[in-house]
């Protein structure tokens, strides 16, 4: 199949591109390189440097005629969405809508949307949160992703769709200089001998899922014909203090963290129920946290 991947030069998108190519698909990447990097782009993919909001995207659809569109391009950081919600909405809502309109015009068969399980449910009523949990996002980012989901479903008469609600994705190629991506930020700081900052007291928790598991979910989601929505997660709750200890051990870092103020927009606890992804796509996370962190630290060392 020919698959157009937006955000294919980013952290998760670049692994998704690798997985599609390995599965024998042809890939076209559209990425503005806002946070993505040319170095992580698979040379076997055709690359178009373009903003998803740019009217010139129509020419890419006209020329390439993708059968499937996989949408990863986004303003992807919660703090940045709090600082500039208008920009967040412009990229994540208007950008997604522009893409969906082109999919309808050019008869795209299937749309795969990277959504968030970490930011869409809000402070959870129950853990792990399943897909029927109420969505009460605490941040503009959570709202823009939720709105994207509504639009995707709305285009369900024109194409089949898959919405993947990721937990906290981590692994090689994650940007250690951004505001999001706690594993990359901690690992990078520890390897450089700097004390990382924990925002809050470190008892807050997240559900961590390894990026190659996420890429595999995207292959299954593109190859299926059934429309559906599922969490892509480990189902396990890990505290930030525990994550810190594990990474300190792997990197040989001996100093305690710096504790800072909690950040607005962040949920306190979250873990996602991954069972629906298994029923729908036959997907479960295969790489546990210890192994995933070891691989990530090894990659950052290199
Ligand atoms: P990332 O910033 O590494 O990737 C985003 C990519 O989109 C970058 O390559 C960037 O250059 C590109 N991009 C941004 N704005 C664009 C625009 N207007 N036009 C074209 N390209 C643009 O972030 P990531 O962590 O790899 O996230 C990828 C996707 O997964 C996002 O949609 C994000 O919301 C979603 N997601 C990520 C996580 C996570 O834990 N990292 C969790 C849930 C959902």
Image (cartoon, rainbow, N blue to C red):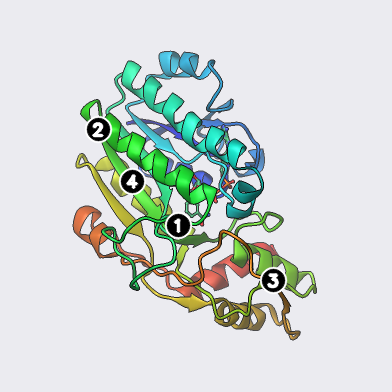
Residue 179 on image: x %, y %:
66, 56
Q: State the CA–CA distance, disc 4 to disc 2.
A: 12 Å
Q: Nearer the viewer, mark 3 or mark 1?
A: 3
**Mark 4 or mark 1, which has the lower sequence index?**
4
Residue 35 on image: x %, y %:
65, 42
Residue 88 in sight here:
yes
User: Which residue is label 2 attached to?
Assistant: 156
Q: Nearer the viewer, mark 4 or mark 1?
A: 4
User: Which residue is label 4 attached to?
Assistant: 163
Q: State the CA–CA distance, disc 4 to disc 1.
A: 18 Å
Q: Nearer the viewer, mark 3 or mark 2?
A: 3
User: Which residue is label 1 attached to?
Assistant: 212
**For residue 57, side relative to residue 175 (left or right):** left
Whether the residue under disc 1 has CB within 8 Å of ligand 1: no
Residue 18 in sight here:
no
Q: Residue at x 58, y 58 (%)?
A: 172
**Mark 4 or mark 3, which has the lower sequence index?**
4
**For residue 45, side relative to residue 200 (left or right):** left
Q: Label 2's element?
A: helix
**Mark 3 or mark 1, which has the lower sequence index?**
1
Q: Label 3's element?
A: loop
Q: Kindly identify which numbered label has been placed on residue 261.
A: 3
In this rendering, is residue 25 above or below 82? Answer: above
Res 37 quadrant in image: top right
């Amino acid at each position: 199949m020919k698959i157009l991947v937006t955000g294919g030069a980013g952290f998760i998108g670049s692994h998704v591109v690798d997985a599609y190519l390995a599965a024998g698909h042809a890939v076209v990447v559209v990425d503005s390189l806002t946070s993505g990097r040319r170095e992580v782009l698979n040379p076997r993919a055709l690359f178009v440097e373009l903003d998803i909001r740019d009217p010139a995207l129509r020419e890419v659809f006209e020329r390439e005629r993708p059968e499937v569109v996989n949408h990863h391009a986004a303003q992807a950081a919660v703090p940045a969405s709090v600082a500039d919600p208008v920009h967040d909405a412009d990229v994540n809502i208007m950008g997604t809508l522009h893409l969906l309109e082109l999919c309808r015009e050019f008869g795209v068969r299937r749309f795969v949307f990277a959504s968030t399980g970490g930011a869409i449910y809000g402070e959870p009523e129950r853990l792990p949160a399943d897909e029927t949990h109420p969505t009460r996002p605490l941040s503009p980012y959570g709202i823009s992703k939720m709105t994207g989901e509504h639009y995707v479903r709305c285009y369900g008469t024109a194409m089949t769709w898959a919405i993947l609600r990721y937990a906290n994705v981590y692994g090689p190629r994650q940007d250690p200089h951004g505001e999001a991506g706690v594993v990359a930020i901690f690992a990078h700081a520890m390897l450089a001998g700097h004390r990382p900052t924990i925002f809050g007291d470190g008892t807050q928790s997240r559900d961590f899922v390894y990026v190659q598991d996420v890429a595999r979910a995207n292959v299954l989601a593109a190859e299926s014909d059934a429309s559906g929505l599922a969490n892509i997660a480990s189902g396990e709750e890990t505290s930030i203090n525990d994550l810190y200890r594990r990474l300190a051990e792997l990197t040989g870092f001996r100093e305690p963290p710096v504790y800072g103020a909690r950040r607005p927009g962040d949920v306190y606890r979250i873990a996602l129920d991954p069972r629906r992804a298994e029923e729908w796509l036959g997907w479960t996370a295969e790489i546990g946290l210890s192994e995933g962190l070891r691989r990530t630290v090894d990659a950052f060392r290199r």
